[in-house]
């Protein structure tokens, strides 16, 4: 399958969420913006990614449409936001990312947040013949191939302290960029003929 890079949309400014009230409001705003935005054949694309602290504890959840990004300090939103729980269960929103099933498993185990309607972009790319020999393909390679957009993966940021009292500007941008790219890549793959969600 030949895939020409789409015009890459610009990533919106990420919104940092650190409280239950801010999560409730931010998720409601994100869901409304997503529902009003572009859809693909099987639903509304929603990029999803997580960042972990040492030991594998999820501390940050990123959710993005092409026009709105939330970076949620999920370890600080206790109890979990009802709006967030409803969004994750809503099959109209296709939660997309590379390794997204693992992110969703950890959110379920650690926070009781179940999810429905997701797609692993690496597996979708394999089904579409975009990965050489059926090999796994990462988000950075997918973003470059589908969007003509390079994802900067600075190891110092990627492996930084995600449980720190305050996230740095670089961490905030890194976190939002991965979830935003998941949404944008899903839209590009659907435009190129890619079905499917899990």
Image (tube, helix red, strand yellow):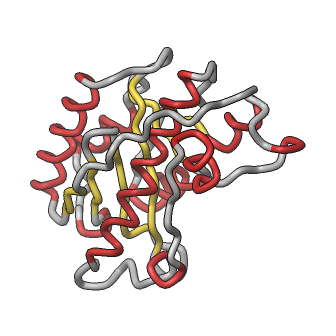
Residue 29 vs residue 53, the one in the foreground = 29
- Percent from the top left, x then y, of residue 156? 49, 84
Q: Residue at x 28, y 66 (%)?
A: 73
- Percent from the top left, x then y, of residue 142? 61, 47
Q: Is residue 38 above or below residue 69?
A: above
- Percent from the top left, x then y, of residue 13? 22, 55
Q: Quadrant of the image for the C terminus? A: top right
Say whether residue 122 is left or right of residue 136: left
Q: In the image as oriented, which residue stretches furthest toward the right?
A: 133
Residue 115 vs residue 92, the one in the foreground = 92
Q: Residue at x 76, y 50 (%)?
A: 136
Q: In the image as oriented, which residue stretches furthest toward the top?
A: 41
Say whether residue 112 is left or right of residue 126: left
Q: How many marks?
A: 0
Residue 28 vs residue 12, the one in the foreground = 12
Q: Residue at x 33, y 65 (%)?
A: 173
Q: Quadrant of the image for the N terminus? A: top right
Identify the image quadrant of residue 19: bottom left
Q: Is residue 18 above or below residue 88?
A: below
- Percent from the top left, x then y, of residue 6? 50, 33
Q: Residue at x 50, y 60 (%)?
A: 151
Say whether residue 5 is left or right of residue 179: right
Say whether residue 136 is left or right of residue 18: right
């Amino acid at each position: 399958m030949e895939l020409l890079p789409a015009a890459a949309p610009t990533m919106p400014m990420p919104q940092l969420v650190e409280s239950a009230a801010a999560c409730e409001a931010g998720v409601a705003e994100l869901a409304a913006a997503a529902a009003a935005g572009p859809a693909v054949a099987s639903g509304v694309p929603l990029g999803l990614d997580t960042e972990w602290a040492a030991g594998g504890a999820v501390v940050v959840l990123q959710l993005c449409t092409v026009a709105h990004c939330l970076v949620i300090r999920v370890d600080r939103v206790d109890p979990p936001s009802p709006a967030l729980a409803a969004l994750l269960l809503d099959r109209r929103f296709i939660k997309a990312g590379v390794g997204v099933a693992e992110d969703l498993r950890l959110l379920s185990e650690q926070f009781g947040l179940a999810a429905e309607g997701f797609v692993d972009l690496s597996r979708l790319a394999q089904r579409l013949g975009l990965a050489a020999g059926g090999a796994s393909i990462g988000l950075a390679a997918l973003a470059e191939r589908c969007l003509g957009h390079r994802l900067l993966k600075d190891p110092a940021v990627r492996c930084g302290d995600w449980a720190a009292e305050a996230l740095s500007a670089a961490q905030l941008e890194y976190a939002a960029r991965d979830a935003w790219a998941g949404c944008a890549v899903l839209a590009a793959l659907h435009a190129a003929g890619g079905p499917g969600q899990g």
